[in-house]
Image: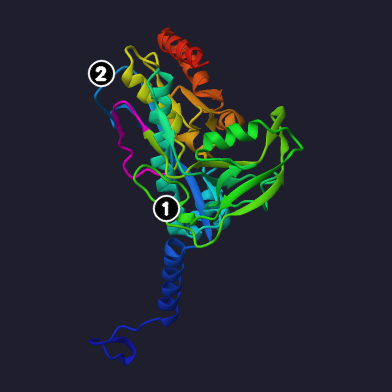
Amino acid sequence: MDGNPAGGTGRRRVDWRVAGGVAVVVAVLLVGAFWRVPYFTVAPGSLRATEPLISVEGAPTYPDDAGEIGYLTVTFGQTTPFGLVRAWIDGDIEVLSEDQALGGLNRDENREVNEALMTNAKDTATAVALDALGYDVELLGTGSIVINVEDGTPAVGVVQPGDVIVSVDGEPVTTAIELTELLALAVPGQEVLLGVQPQSASMMVGHAGSQPPASTEPEREVSVTLAERPDEPGRAYLGVRSATRDATYNLPFEVTIDSGNVIGPSAGLAFTLAVIDVLTPGNLTGGRTVAVTGTISPSGQVGRVGGVPQKAAAAMGAGATVYLVPVDEAEQARTRAGDTMEVVPVATLDEALAYLATLSGDTSVVDIVAANRAAEG
């Protein structure tokens, strides 16, 4: 018999139920893969060698290829339904709400802030490194910008991110260091009067060459009763993390750090150590790959960074055997690292250098820094 069965017309029949089902599946896949939900994920990034990023003009350098100081990154971004499923399966991925991730800013403002924080971190790292090695360094600024307000501290409801503290009890504040020094003169329970200027969130951190726009709101005075630091009994505590607005450093020679498209302040300690290593003979790491994370303050204090477990995963994946982390994030790092990698908590640059000296067996840099600290008084 020729032709089609049952007297068909020769056209292929279409089962619209099957076609509709396929269309639904395709739509679900597209939505799952591309529709952005109001959540962000933090995933392991990479370990990046710091010393190749540093160039110096006007001073001798001492490059070497033995070991490396690596700073760590995370992969961060708004996610999809599939991304949430992946995070549920993969314990190295953390999910944050939009407010947790962006800190009340929009995406553009958050990126601008973190770009400025990276610039500030590089400037501060260079200045701290040179100061530790005995070079003359001067920090200038126009106030102390509030970057973060810690929950449950006296600063809550008194100042907010973007505010600029310009005085304490009438004494001018031009840098973040001056704010810390003036607050250190107070005692827990003491009431102080802060002079505060409002500031655009997208210009929260100034750096060399930047000029934040003038505020349209007047300076205000706010009263706050200081608490006692949980980790330092007897020391007064406001509860803010701040940076110097429009910070500039007078340096004896030029140091440039090429951070590429990486943003945020968390490579501060790594950059500081790398600048010191470049400017001194010998090798800080003893030939090992040392992963480092932590902010650096102008006074050499190492601060929190977030994403420590994800960075631990990145460090182990890159073959690091040592992981330097801020003191109060060490437990998170140990939980992820287990016995695979040594986790070393550090509170200051000096502590980090002292530990590295145990790896290299060379205390010359520690001795130089100690002598300079003693000379400064």
Q: Is the magenta stretch mostly helix, strand or loop?
A: loop
Residue occupying the point 43% across, 7% down: 361
Lower sequence index among marks 1 and 2? 2
Q: Quadrant of residue 53?
A: top left
Q: Say whether residue 318 is visible.
A: no
Residue at the spot of label 2: 60
Q: Which of 151 and 59 is in front in this view?
A: 59
Q: Which amino acid does label 2 sit on?
A: Pro
Q: Position of residue 188 (x, y in %)?
A: 74, 34
User: Nearer the viewer's eye, disc 1 or disc 2?
Assistant: 1
- Vertical side of 6 occupied by 52: above or below: above
Type of amino acid under label 1: Pro
The residue carrying pointer 1 sits among few (fewer than 14), some (14 to 19) or many (20 or more) residues within 10 Å by Cα, namely some
Q: Which residue is drawn at 51% across and 58% down?
A: 105
Quarter of the picture holding the N terminus: bottom left
Across and down, in percent, residue 278 comes to 32, 21
Task: Please state which of residues 295 and 141 is positioned toward the viewer in this rendering.
Answer: 141
**Above or below: residue 298 compared with residue 90:** above
Q: In which quarter of the image is residue 187?
A: top right
Query: Which residue is drawn at the image coordinates 54% and 35% (left, top)?
Result: 178
Helix, strand or loop at mark 1: loop
Question: Quick check: is 367 in the magenta stretch?
Answer: no
Residue occupying image coordinates x 41% and y 12%? 365
Q: What stretch is highlighted in magenta?
A: 250-263
Residue 158 shows in the view = yes
Q: What element carries label 2?
A: loop
Residue 2: % across, % down: 22, 86
Residue of label 1: 212
Q: In this view, does 359 lie to the left or right of 242?
A: left
